[in-house]
Image (cartoon, rainbow, N blue to C red):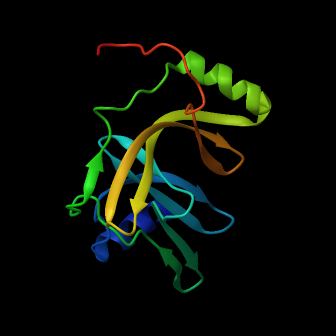
Amino acid sequence: PDLHQKGIDYINNHAGWTDQFIYNNWSPYEHKVSFRLYHEGFPVYNENVQTTIDIIWGEEGIYQYDRPYFELKKSRRLEHLTSEAYLPPGDIVIEKLLEQVEPKDLQALRIGYKFNQDSQKSIISLEPRWFYLYGENWLSISFDDQGGEKRGLE
């Protein structure tokens, strides 16, 4: 079987689907397959916390298996910010992004959740954000420095 199916079979055999994970990418040269954590239909990202299941195959089986050490669906400390979150429309996001990056290097743009964890209070929050794929990294776009009018209902 291909890397995708081998990865799915391995995770199935080791009770690894602790939350919703969806195929993310694969590298045939590294013999690697990756599945990203999703919550409520959107991908979850963080630069410092593992939000993917990554499997690298060696010649005789699994060479490396990395996965998150938390479960969102079992966390009693999961707070959602979705009801209070405001995301600007796509045209404004693209306009700001094109001021910051080379358009030819921009590979994708999507809405997702930024995984935040307050280790002192053991609270996990998922903050809706716009993310863009630049090189091999998903980066978030911050609009904290912008003023202007609030759109939508109060």
| Left or right of 137 in this view: 46 | left
- Count of labels in the image: 0
Residue 10 image point, x, y percent: 38, 73
Residue 150 image point, x, y percent: 43, 16
Q: Picture quarter containing residue 74?
A: bottom left
- In this view, the residue in front, 30 or 139, is 139
Residue 106 sits above or below residue 150 on the image: below
Residue 84 sits above or below residue 58 on the image: above
Q: Which residue is drawn at 69% across and 65% down?
A: 29
| Left or right of 24 in this view: 136 | right
Residue 70 image point, x, y percent: 34, 68
| Left or right of 146 in this view: 103 | right
The residue most toward the bottom is: 60
| Left or right of 38 in this view: 137 | right
- In this view, the residue in front, 96 or 9, is 96
- The image quadrant where one finds the C terminus is top left
Q: Picture quarter containing residue 14?
A: bottom left
Q: Residue at x 60, y 31 (%)?
A: 145
- In this view, the residue in front, 149 or 12, is 149
Q: Which residue is drawn at 42% across and 62% down?
A: 5
Residue 129 image point, x, y percent: 47, 37
